[in-house]
Amino acid sequence: MIKESEYVKRRVALADKLSSHSITVLFSAKAKQRSNDTEYPYRQNSNFYYMCGLKEDNAALVIVKKAKKSKTYLFVQKKMNF
């Protein structure tokens, strides 16, 4: 298992390669439906997983770079409790 700090290093390295005042968006893979009530086993988008290690569907990773500073946002879908 990879430590969270490794994912942070990867995101920082990507942000360093971006030009000033730019945005990068990575989306997670979507769940694929096999039939009306069955889904295929979920497989995360490789690039998304490499950057954050998250296996959630319907998520997005956003990296915003302004001048020399960057900020990272992770959006995930709210889970429903039944």
Image: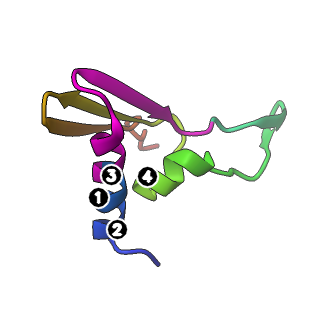
Q: Which mark is residue 6?
A: 2
Could you tell me how far apart the alpha carbons at marks 3 and 2 are, in whole angstroms? Answer: 11 Å
Q: State if disc 2 and disc 1 touch (CB < 8 Å).
A: yes
For mark 3, what is the residue? Answer: 13
- Camera-side residue of 16 and 48: 16
Mark 3 to mark 4: distance in Å? 10 Å
Q: Position of residue 30 (x, y in %)?
A: 63, 35
SS type, badge 3 = helix
Query: Which quadrant would residue 67 be assigned to in this image?
Result: top left
Label 2 neighbour load within 10 Å: few <14, some 14-19, many 20+: some
Q: Secondary structure at mark 4?
A: helix
Q: Using the image as rendered, state which of residue 43 and residue 41 is in the foreground.
A: 43
The residue depicted at 54 percent of the width and 41 percent of the height is: 57
CA distance separating discs 1 and 4: 8 Å
- Mark-to-mark CA distance, 1 and 2: 5 Å
Residue 54, image x, y percentages: 46, 54
Q: Which residue is mark 4?
A: 51
The numbered mark, 1 or 3, whose residue comes first in the sequence reads 1
Of callouts 3 and 2, the N-terminal one: 2
Amino acid, disc 2? Glu
Locate residue 70, reporting x and y percent: 18, 37
Q: Which residues are magenta?
A: 12-29
Which residue was labeled with disc 1?
Answer: 8
| Disc 1 crowd, CA 10 A, few/some/many (<14, 14-19, 20+) | some
Depth check, front residue: 23 or 31: 23
Nearer the observer, 75 or 70: 70
